[in-house]
Amino acid sequence: MTAPRCNRRGFTVAELLLSLAILVFVGLGITGVLAATATAIDDRSKFGDPAVLAALARTRIDAVTGGARCVLGTEESPTQRTLVLWLDDARPSATAHASELGYLRFDRTRGSLWLDLPDPLLRSSPSALARRDPELDAETGWMGFRDEEAASGMLQSELLYEGLADCRFELPRDAQRSESFAILLELHPDAAASTRVLLLPFGIEAHEVPVR
């Protein structure tokens, strides 16, 4: 009686080559996934870079200051520092009305820079048009009306930059007659940046000084 014969066939050259091709294909796929992940992480870190964030903030401010008439002045309090802009002479009078003002506001307690602008939808409503909208000057003061407008929901606020140690507005002595100003953003020491101070210059193209 003969014993059953076992067929122990090894891999052929073709099968080995096919296996190697599959391994190479899988390896290339894994490499591509890892490279895409690394790129996404790198892009995210670049987007969070302080200089990139400052550039985004500058683009938004430029869109406002490019059409603004002039810088009216600054106001300071223990909780915030604010630069007041005359945005436009929407109520033609060559004077600044409360509804024509915008504000760059540094919140000291939160370390954040904000842009406060009149809400265009609310401004066009009958109730808004019927509101008291006085002409303002330096003696009248700007901030009392800003706080009143904000409390009434007439302003829309946009966060421009956060995580700041300080923010200063650099203005000449006669701010209203100047066609430019600058913002200094001071970063925290632990910020991922090569410098702790970022300077953002701005120009006012349609410059005009109110008559009062």
Image (spheres, rainbow, N blue to C red):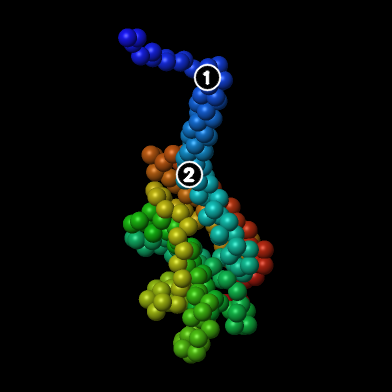
Residue 191 seen from this side: yes
Q: Position of residue 119 (x, y in %)?
A: 49, 75
| Residue drawn at x 35%, y 9% as measured from the top left | 2
Q: Residue furthest right?
A: 205
| Residue drawn at x 45%, y 60% as measured from the top left | 159
Q: Position of residue 97 (x, y in %)?
A: 53, 79
Q: Position of residue 166 (x, y in %)?
A: 41, 50
Q: Residues within 10 Å of mark 2 (few under 14, many from 20)?
A: few
Residue type at mark 1: give it. Answer: Leu
Circle 2 sits in a helix, a strand or a loop, which is it?
Answer: helix
Q: Earlier in the sequence, mark 1 or mark 2?
A: 1
Which residue was labeled with disc 1?
16
| Residue drawn at x 44%, y 47% as measured from the top left | 186
Q: In the picture shown, does residue 129 fall above or below 10?
A: below
Q: Residues within 10 Å of mark 1 (few under 14, many from 20)?
A: few
Q: Position of residue 47 (x, y in %)?
A: 50, 46
Residue 182 seen from this side: no
Marking on residue 44: 2
Gap between marks 1 and 2, in whole Å?
42 Å
Marking on residue 167: none
Nearer the camera: disc 1 or disc 2: 1
Q: Residue furthest front?
A: 1
| Quadrant including the C terminus | bottom right
Out of 74 and 60, give the one closest to the viewer.
60
- The part of the image, by quadrant, that contains residue 77 is bottom left
Q: In the picture shown, does residue 30 fall above or below 207?
A: above
Circle 1 sits in a helix, a strand or a loop, which is it?
Answer: helix
| Quadrant including the N terminus | top left
Residue type at mark 2: give it. Answer: Arg
